[in-house]
Image: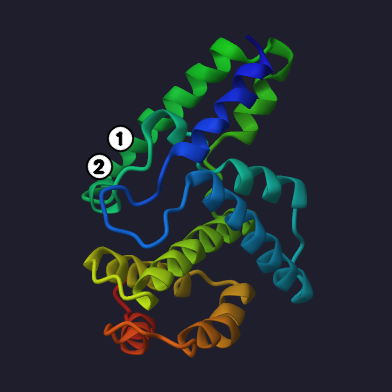
Amino acid sequence: MGIHSYFRSLNELERIIRCPGKFKFEEHSVAAHSWKVIQYAKTLADIEEKNGASINWKKLYEITSSHDYGEIFIGDIKTPVKHASPELRLLIQQVEEGMVYNFIEEHIPEEFKEIFHNQLREGKDESIEGLILEVADKMDQVYEAFAEIQKGNTEKEFVKMYRNALIKIKNIHLHCVDYFLSHILPDMVNDEITSSVDIRRITEEALADNGA
């Protein structure tokens, strides 16, 4: 069915809800998440450029827009399950990548297969674009979890998500991370909060954590 199959499959991302099985005041689809990650990433990349970095913008847009495409086949697996062990995380990644590979081989015309294999690959790596994707992906976890906590959601999973995402971000050595921690995060924490959860304390503890 050609590239039409790929275009039609994108509708699935609108129906896959993130953080399944937990009460949420606001539902977020994988498609919405991907769009937000692109927005975060382009601003983070601008910050890097202002600090002298060279950005491959084509690569950045490709990996940020497609980084969760594989969830069409496996859904959004609960974070505690996904990260229960390095071995399980690797197996899940291998299954996801294998299904994406098979989809491309089965549906994409021969002259475009190499392009699709390159664009739909796992984009998180040690390149500056891969690191920006990692930061942007975790930033959306921060914002989603923060919004739930702010509204008074008492699910412990969102506190854990917020804390772990912050720890991951602060351990990535980029200028944009410094900017996020110094300028953006304080504005977030200073927002009016109706929750009984002490988000300021959790934030300070996460930033002081040296174990991740």
36, 139: nearer the viewer: 36
- What secondary structure is marked by label 2? helix
What residue sits 50% from the left and 62% below the top?
A: 140
- What secondary structure is marked by label 1? helix
Q: Give how far apart the Cα atoms at labels 2 and 1 are.
A: 6 Å
Q: Give the class, few, some or many, for how many residues have Cα within 10 Å of label 2's Cα (few <14, many ≥20).
A: few
Residue 5, quarter of the rendered image: top right
Residue 36 x %, y %: 59, 57
Left/right placement of residue 157 relative to residue 167 reads left
The reply to whether dot 2 and dot 1 touch (C-beta < 8 Å) is yes
Type of the residue with mark 1 = Leu
Query: Quick one: quadrant of the C terminus?
Result: bottom left
16 shown above or below 212: above
Type of the residue with mark 2 = Glu
Residue 106, quarter of the rendered image: top right
Residue 118 x %, y %: 63, 32
Total count of labels: 2
Q: Disc 1 designates what residue?
A: 91
Residue 87: mark:
2
